[in-house]
Image: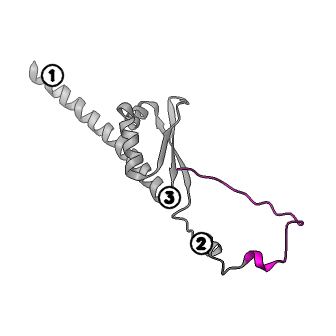
């Protein structure tokens, strides 16, 4: 998914009274003005603990690839660590990015809960063996 930002700088020399340039009946004009916020590409960042980055990435990038496929968003985890934290970058439509964010939150939450559950099971197993 690629995004591009274009900027138009208007100087006094560029301004024109030629109404033919801005004919609102032209097809391209109507197409451009039908765009809404749901199709605009946005970027959102999330900071996660370095230990959860591996959970989000998964073995051979299986989890992050699944998130990308499921949501349609571009998801990238910055390789640089900052105080044992990493930045997850999500790009796509507002809906795609929201879904990717929710998937990552749910994945980390499930990992935390399963990890606690596994610790409890492991401790109970040791008590039973004694």
Q: Is residue 128 above or below residue 22?
A: above
Q: Which residue is mark 1?
A: 126
Q: Residue at x 40, y 40 (%)?
A: 64
The CA distance from mark 1 to mark 3 is 48 Å
- The mark found on residue 3 in the picture is none
| Residue 18 image offset from top left, x and y in percent | 82, 77
Q: Which residues are magenta?
A: 1-22
Quick check: can you spot residue 10? Answer: yes
Callout count: 3
Disc 3: CA contacts within 10 A as few (<14), some (14-19) or many (>=20): some
Q: Is residue 76 magenta?
A: no
The CA distance from mark 2 to mark 1 is 67 Å
Q: Residue at x 86, y 63 (%)?
A: 11
Judge by depth and name the residue closer to the eye, 40 or 22: 22
User: Which quarter of the rendering shows the C terminus?
Assistant: top left
Q: Residue at x 54, y 29 (%)?
A: 83
Judge by depth and name the residue closer to the eye, 117 or 58: 58
Q: Is residue 38 left or right of residue 23?
A: left
| Residue 17 image offset from top left, x and y in percent | 84, 77
The CA distance from mark 3 to mark 2 is 20 Å
Magenta highlight: main SS: loop
């Amino acid at each position: 998914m690629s995004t591009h930002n274009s900027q138009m700088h208007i100087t006094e020399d560029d301004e024109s009274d030629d109404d033919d340039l801005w004919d609102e009946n032209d097809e391209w004009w109507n197409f451009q003005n039908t765009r809404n916020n749901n199709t605009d590409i946005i970027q959102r960042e999330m900071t996660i603990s370095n230990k959860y980055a591996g959970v989000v990435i998964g073995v051979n990038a299986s989890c992050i690839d699944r998130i990308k496929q499921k949501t349609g968003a571009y998801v990238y985890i910055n390789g640089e660590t900052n105080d044992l934290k990493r930045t997850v970058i999500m790009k796509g439509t507002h809906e795609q990015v929201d879904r990717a964010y929710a998937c990552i939150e749910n994945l980390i939450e499930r990992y935390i809960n399963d990890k606690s559950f596994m610790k409890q099971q492991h401790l109970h197993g040791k008590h039973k063996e004694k």
